[in-house]
Image (spheres, rainbow, N blue to C red):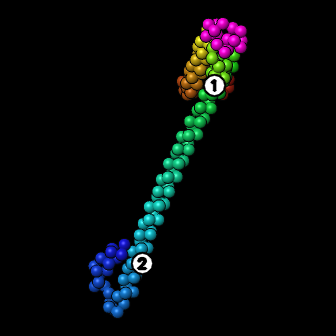
């Protein structure tokens, strides 16, 4: 910065009116240069803060969306499991949530392992079907009013 100030002073030497005030004139040039650099740094810092803030907000929104999606999926899965018959629900909960092995579950319930495997497979198939139906229903539920039957008046609840 001091070199830049000296170069600037050299280029503007013709503007110096009184050679006796050379020292004060040089100090003023250095102070002005320092102030200019400080302003530039402040602008850059403000710009970086704004960019970081925008990025932080964007990441926060994305994270919240992911968490909401995971929570919704968890709720959907819980509801799908809740629709299963009790014997299938027990097997799925013990196997996946309590991390028990098939032999442990068989011994605990007094049921053959093959029977438990069939129950588990049947439970998984039903859960998949329920979740797929939910996805299909949510996609069909997003239809706009224009796609509905034009002979039905939604607001009056009856036919036109």
* Mark drawn on residue 76: 1
Q: Which residue is mark 2?
A: 31
Nearest the viewer among 98 and 3 is: 98
Q: Would you say 40 lies left or right of 108 here?
A: left
Q: Is residue 109 magenta?
A: yes
Bounds of the magenta segment: 103-117
Residue 55 drawn above or below residue 80:
below
**Residue 149 visible:** no
Residue 52: x and y in percent read: 50, 52
The residue at 36%/83% (across/down) is 26
Cα distance, mark 1 to mark 2? 67 Å
Label 1 element class:
helix
Q: Is residue 141 magenta?
A: no
Residue 4: x and y in percent read: 33, 74
Q: Would you say 105 lies left or right of 51 here?
A: right
**In front: mark 1 or mark 2?**
2
């Amino acid at each position: 910065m001091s070199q830049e100030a000296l170069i600037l002073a050299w280029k503007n030497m013709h503007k110096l009116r009184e050679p006796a005030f050379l020292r004060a004139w040089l100090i003023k040039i250095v102070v002005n240069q320092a102030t200019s650099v400080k302003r530039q740094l402040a602008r850059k810092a403000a710009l970086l803060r704004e960019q970081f803030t925008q990025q932080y907000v964007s990441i926060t929104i994305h994270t919240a969306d992911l968490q909401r999606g995971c929570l919704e999926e968890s709720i959907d899965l819980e509801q799908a499991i809740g629709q299963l018959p009790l014997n299938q629900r027990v097997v799925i909960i013990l196997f996946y949530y309590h991390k028990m092995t098939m032999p442990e579950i068989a011994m605990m319930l007094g049921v053959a392992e093959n029977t438990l495997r069939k129950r588990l497979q049947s439970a998984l198939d039903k859960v998949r079907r329920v979740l797929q139906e939910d996805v299909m229903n949510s996609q069909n539920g997003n239809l706009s009013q224009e796609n509905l039957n034009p002979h039905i008046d939604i607001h009056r609840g009856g036919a036109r």
